[in-house]
Image: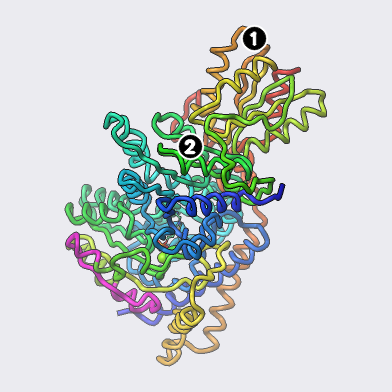
Amino acid sequence: MLSSADKIRLYKQMLLIRRLEERVAESYGEQEIGGFTHLYIGQEAVAVGAISALNNDDYVISTYRDHGHYLARGGDPKKFMAELFGRETGICRGKGGSMHLADVENHFFGGTGIVGGSLPIAVGMGLACSYRDDDRVVMCLFGDGATNQGVFHESLNFAKLWNLPVVFVCENNFYGIGTDVRIASALTEVHKKASAYGLPGYRVNGMDVLEVRKLCDDVVGLVRGGAGPALIEARCYRYQGHSMTDPGRYRARAEEELWRKRDPIPRLAASLLSAGLLSEERIAELEREVDDVCEEAVAFASDSPRPALSSLYEDVYNETYPSDPHA
Amino acid sequence: MREIRYYEALNEALAEEMRRDENVFVMGEDVGLFGGTFRVTEGLMAEFGARRVRDTPIAEAGIVGLAIGAAFAGTRPVPELMTMNFAIVAMDQIINHASKMRYMFGGQIDIPLTIRAAGGGGTQKGAQHSHSIESWFVNAPGIRVVIPSTPADAKGLLKTSIRSNDPVLFIEHEMLYSVRGPVPEDGEDLIPFGVADVKRSGSDLTIVAWSKMMHEALRAAEALDAEGISAEVIDPRTLDPFDWDAVLGSVSRTRRCVVAEEGWRTVGVGAEIASRVTEALFYELEAPVQRVGAVDVPLPYAKNLEAAALPNAQDIVRAALKITT
Ligand SMILES: Cc1ncc(C[n+]2csc(CCOP(=O)(O)OP(=O)(O)O)c2C)c(N)n1
Ligand SMILES: [Mg+2]
């Protein structure tokens, strides 16, 4: 059972992701941020509910839509914003940007821009856990679109075959860029794809952080206990376009409005208010706290220096040789 | 002549070839309802319907493999891979299958297949979305590599690619889609493979460059002109087949050569060109052939680092000055 402090923590995390993402959109508009930038707005309940069910030393791996995952894993908002600004103080020294956030100290193995690319890697981390016989689990978050890549199927098979501690979390937001899941997937109920490989498949309302958390507590417990891998389908919705350059015209207004009514943040606020766990004043206070964090993050990013040109040549290898390119 | 954009020229080529040949069809991620990530397939769904403009799952190995099979069986598929980096996901189908099967089967089959993909950096898309990896495919026999720099070349070469009976990798550049230029309206104005185009004539130095680097080369030639150096810019337009006669002919007149590509310099296409030029013209060259290319690191995200990693007109000028002054 979650304590009221736990629930308030989940609320604050979702709010932080939402507000920081709004800052990201602003800074993108001001051309401080470039490249492909995929916002997580609307899907906060999935990252926060799922990742909070893990232990600190469990492994998490993500996609290019990785902002929410990074932050839910406890990533520093300042280093996050600085990375997006392409600054030296960024979590990846400005080398990765929005799509490639990694925070290895927090066991967050980052974003990949290749749809499906992280799935076998997650299974490989699960293999190492099983190999060492440690107590960790791996959580792999990915989109509905990834479930049609060959590696999705290879990964589920491997994970089950070798009984590896991997929790596959599919964020089904019903679209891969402009393509409706019904156009791309023969089986649109993603959780049922698990059965082909003998994994349990669960479906959860990804707009309700408490439901996500509850299911993940149970599933992570089972997987940690040696029950083998599992697939969770969290149904959710991204409120913005696919990336900052996508106006998202392919979605029906009515559909968007329906999902906006299911916004996970006001939903949790309402339930905490009615249970008397939060007051309007406390909510306003939390919002101020979050806004301060966002403010600081943006200020930190814009005050940070751009990476030194010599860093261009660093980080390619651990061991370098004279024939490697250098400054 | 009327001027249109590079993406519009490609769109015209697709539409014309689809009208001309019922066997030509398009498939790929977001090519239909969405209209194409870079608008190249815009309007095709409305004209040709979902049978001939097929939205696919995100499954590049599958997309290319299906296209090979469909080509075996008598159609002319034109699959789109959203970007060149995703061609890496389909590498086995492209190299192990598309490029080798005709040969392995003793010439019994044709694979009329045109794989379109956008490459190139310059918009901070980072290490997994920006690389120019044409050299990987030029290295492999059995697949043609077409890489146009202008709207007219884009249209004429895409039409030739679609009509070709061999597999073609048709590489576009993200930064060129909005470039405008004159494009013939005549639907039979095709550009043959293996014919380079002199984009600017000159007498002191030959710059060989393609795709976006061709435009950098023209900028460099302007700058060199101001220094009293007359540079010829040759765009091979297709890297396989390659118009060696044009390049060797030009260099034997100018006696100096710079090759400029956006891909990594090491084992790039430029290395092959430099070596062939040297083999053929060693005693006529006034100076060693110079190669310009990307720094050999995965492309970084930060704007200043990305700019430092990618080659540009200044790099070409620097290389040219090294062998002309
Ligand atoms: C291998 C590969 N193919 C295509 C793309 C281009 N692409 C980027 S995101 C995306 C859609 C992915 O949809 P989904 O997995 O549902 O994730 P979502 O964006 O909805 O979070 C596509 C096609 C890519 N990045 N990688
Ligand atoms: Mg999706």
What subunit carries mark 2? A
Q: Residue furthest top?
A: B283
Q: Are marks 2 and 1 in contact (CB under 8 Å)?
A: no
**What quarter of the picture does the N terminus of chain A occupy?**
bottom left
Query: Which residue is labeled 2 in the image?
Result: A316
Above or below for B221 versus B21: above
Query: Which residue is labeled 1 in the image?
Result: B284
Residue at image location 60% in from the left, 25% down from the top:
B291
Q: Secondary structure at mark 2?
A: loop
Q: Position of residue A155 (x, y in %)?
A: 26, 53
Residue at image location 36% in from the left, 63% down from the top:
A184
Q: In the image, which is nearer the foreground, mark 2 or mark 1?
A: 1
Q: At label 1, which amino acid type do we have?
A: Glu
- Crowding at dot 2, Cα within 10 Å, few <14 / some 14-19 / many 20+, comes out as few
Q: Position of residue B76 (x, y in %)?
A: 40, 47
Let me know if residue B133 is in the magenta part.
no
Does the Cβ of the disc 1 residue fall within 8 Å of ligand 1?
no
Q: Read off the magenta span.
A: A193-215
